[in-house]
Image (cartoon, coloured by chain):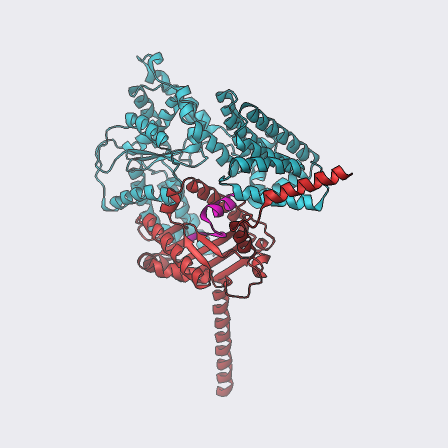
Chain colours: A cyan, B red
Amino acid sequence: MKHARMIALTALPLLACIAPARAGGEGFYGPLELKDSELQLMKNADAAEDQFVRHSYRYDSPELEAALKRIGGALAPKPTDSYIRYRFFVVRDIETNAFALPDGQVYVNSGLLAALENEAQLAGVLAHEVHHTAGHHGILSYRSARHKAITGAIIGPLTLGVGDYFLEMSVFGYSRDLEEEADRLGLKRMLVAGYDPRQVPRMLQILAQDPEGETLEMKASKWSTHPALMARVDYTQAMLPGVMLGHKADALKVNGSGYRVLVRRVSLDTVQDLIAADQPRTAVTLAQRLVKEDGGGPAALVALGDARSALGPVALLGSEAELTNKQKMKTLRLKAYLTRSEREATLLETPEGRETLRKNLDVARQAYQRALAIDGSIAEAHRGLGYVYKRAGRPIDAGKEFVIYLQARPQAPDKQVILGEMKAINATLKKGGAKR
Amino acid sequence: MTHARSTRHRRTTATLAVALMVGTLATAVAYAKAFMSNGIRAKASRPARLVVLPPHAEFIKDKMIMTDQMLSEAATLEREAAQALKTQLEAKGYKVRVATPQEISKTPGLAAVVKKANDRYEEEWSKLVYRPKKIREHRYTVGPEAVKLCAMLRADGVVVTRIVAVGVSKGKATMRAIFGSSAPHSYARVDFGLVEGRQGFIEGYFIGFENTSLSQLTKKPAYVMSQASENALKRYPGADEELPLLEVTAEAAQDDEGGADPVGDFEALLNKSAGAQGQK
């Protein structure tokens, strides 16, 4: 064992020399012939399209896909190779992310679409992604990784897998240089397509937002392949004067209101997805924004009620102490160890937790009642009120609201869930003691 | 002297043989693990109509020079595992069908519910693997998403499967054996959770391992998945075993026939309560 450690330590400097030889500083924008193993890579990329459908990841919205095709099509450089065919899809995922495959498949997460403010920001995302494909970044990274895999396989056994660690570190995502290149070329391409590139730093700021207060503050180190988002905000900001030189900013397209109308349904769905994924603070932030945009429309108010109710005993804003890296680590550890109901029960043991629950339920109740005042037929508000009353210890009121919901939506997809709630309420009433 | 030596030799051989047998048995036990709720253990409640959701497979290939076919091979493993689970659960007497990706994508709203239920299961699974025995107390739940899913699929429960296949080439395995690295062999692991459709609890968690080779994984995926699934299902109780009451199924059948009416019951309880207050 001592001997093995010695070998590993001796090999470390050697591996450190290999690691910086990452996937080059720049992409290749001409025709790039594929090697045999890369043809297989392309087949696999093609299979990914089917994989996303098979695992129910694709978000079904022909309007959104048509919009992505229109915007992305205007931004994508002419394909240089027969294996590149640009197509754009939406993935049902709350993360604010997008990615491109080497054969031209571009995926944008529903969470990102819901978070962006205008079409120019979406164009910024797509311009960045299509340049990963156009610059063959995936293939070049694969070639670089493959070289390292062969070297790693030769010296790997000597280092007891230390080589794999370095390999993983350099393979994870595109290199910082390639990301910067996609940003730089993306800005220029946006101008050509008539979009305002000044929206890109704002778009990156949106990506960096963390209403949940769970993301650890990390500084970009010499080992990290992805540039930190705030660093990307800074350098895209610095690039803008040069890019904009000679262009009239007023003539460039931003399209805020049209975009937000387009992403309204996906935004409402994202609120529900965030709730399901136990991200209630982010859900409340998005729902509040929808309420503002909508001028207090009933669907947005119901979404706000649902999100606020999902907060339960969790405060809307994290305290300063909660936002330190140390506390965030502790919260993440607790989240990894305890189930949702156990965490909630722990919070409800404290008077603060109980008071926060009361406040959140009150705000949720008001949001549902406002929705019903605007549109009395919005059954989901009754369902929401049912849950609020149930948690507030008012089973009779909860039951009444659930009955209204079921009468209005006899074929609701969650009918069995509500009937389950009704059974529990009936059991409570049979025991007696409930007055409301 | 010769006699004593011979006796000692026989004793050593016997001891080694016993140790080898114990070792082999211990390994065999480790290749199939099962954790079940009290309801299933007592055979008091058990979902009878099951739907196997499309499994998720991860194929980790460790070769001297890496090729990249894992995606399509993982898809094959997923397909074969779903089929193997269906066949073997049916053999145990359950009504089983596999929810195909085509069915899921064609039914309006189903894809979103499947994804949410899968994500929720994943969240619980990350805790469950550390304390699987807590399944007995219904610690883990997929919640309303599972209830919605089962209602849409008209099932009493769903089977959520994860597959990990590790393929190590002979060259790499030899190098690792020489230089003493861990896990030098290939294997397939199938684990699945049984989620009931009334409240969404994870009722059972079953794991099956199968030692195999890289070539078997790629050339005979159906065989490997069948073996691993069989191992996982070893302790899954059969539907034909003594069943005092299939509570979940019985309730579902009652609901289907319109027997249960929680809304009517609620209204009756309200009226009764109003009547009692009026009398006062």
Q: Is residue A81 left or right of residue B259?
A: left
As drawn, the residue found furthest toward the right would be B280
Left or right placement of residue B192 versus residue A173 in this view? right
Q: Is residue B152 magenta?
A: yes
* In-front residue for pair B270/B74: B270
Toward which corner of the image does residue A77 lie, by quadrant? top left
| Residue B235 visible (yes or no) | yes
The relative height of residue A301 versus residue A329 in the rendered view (above or below) is above
Against A404, residue A4 (above or below) is: below
In this rendered view, identify the residue nearer to me: A126 or B229.
Answer: B229
Residue B280 spot, x, y in % from top left: 78, 38
Q: Which residues are magenta?
A: B144-163
Q: Quadrant of the C terminus of chain A?
A: top right
Residue drawn at 43 percent across, 63 percent down: B91
- In depth, the one of B221 and A288 nearer the eye is A288
Is A137 drawn above or below residue A295 in the view shown? below
Quadrant hosting residue A185: top left
Q: Is residue A434 visible?
A: no
